[in-house]
Image: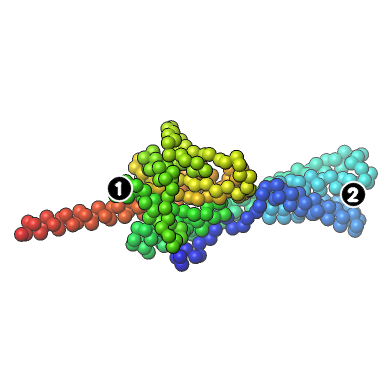
Amino acid sequence: MTELDSLPRLEERDQGPAWRRNLIDCLLGLFGSLLVTLLIYAFHLYPSIPNISLTYLLVVLALASRRSLFSAIFASFVAFASFDFFLVDPLFTFTITKFEEWLALFVFLATAVITGELAAALRKRAEQASRRERETRILYELVRATNREENLARQLKVISDAMVMVFAPLGVRDCLILLPGPDGKPSIVGGMVDRREPQKLSPDEEATVAWVMKQGQTVELHDVSLAGQQQSGHYAPRAIVRSTISRASLRRYIRLYPLQTGSRVIGVMRLLIEDDPRFVEGNKGLGVEGPREQTNPRTAFFWTFLDQATSVIERARLRREALQVELLQRTDALRAAL
């Protein structure tokens, strides 16, 4: 689909598991602080330059602005310890005889920590602004692409393509949009890709989609039949059945979201989601398993996609009703003329 080729990803880069990022941050903080200590010791800059310890702030600022607050604080403590051990008399011991040296070291440590926190806060705000800019561009391109199409199926296909393209880093691998057919059974109207064979739902999926349309709640499908399961309550249920046999690192499941206008369900979005370590870790990922949250910026953007699909379906329904009303009016006028 050419209309959405320029869409940016919601996540621009894969940072890997948290333990790997923390390990890299620790190594960078350790090597950066020890490198500054080695330079000061090799060129005998202390105590000839009393404020040479401020050089460590360059490492702290670099780590806080490029990596994380954790790496900056870790570098601050390494700098504090290495400066005391290698540069402050008596050398190669953590014993300090003068009170002013203790005071200077602790002032340096507090300054380094505060500087790291400020730099990390500025980096976080810059990332949030960049993320909001990407989200605004994605939504603009999505609305423009759907407005170019007049056929409902093509419009829903645009939304399905965009859903997979944007949320692929968070585990989304496929997207289908289902609408109730004339016989009441769900039928696939919009899908992610053009398939050679028509996409069909399993009996379990058809039964669960019908339940979602009736109850208006989110459901997860895993490995077994959920046709007879009934749950009630204000919060959206999660029908989770996980196999204990499979030990694969990746896990695929289906999540069904109701597309609602008011209290009426007009369709269902079916997402095929594949867990990866970054998706599972800390329950980040989409973060939309529970009740709808519009205050969380991560989940609000996802719900905007569902709202766009809902508005497209509702506009198509209103156009059909308007055409029917116009047809009835012209029929009445023709009958009166005859």
Q: Considering the image in quadrants, where does the C terminus appear? A: bottom left
Q: Residue furthest right?
A: 90
Relative image position of residue 69 (x, y in whole percent): 69, 47
The residue positioned 39% from the left and 53% from the top of the image is 188
SS at mark 2 in the image:
loop
Colour scheme of this structure image? rainbow
Determine which residue is flagged by label 1: 183
Q: Residues within 10 Å of mark 1 (few under 14, many from 20)?
A: few
Answer with the quarter of the image where residue 45 lies. bottom right
Is residue 46 left or right of 295 when viewed as pictured? right
Earlier sequence position, callout 1 versus callout 2: 2
Identify the residue shown where x is 29% and y is 49%.
Answer: 182
What is the x, y in percent for residue 240?
52, 39
Q: Residues within 10 Å of mark 2 (few under 14, many from 20)?
A: many
Is 185 on the left or on the right of 238, as rendered? left
* Residue positioned 57% across, 54% down in the render: 169
Residue 87 tag number: 2
Give whichever of 192, 128 is nearer the camera.
Answer: 192
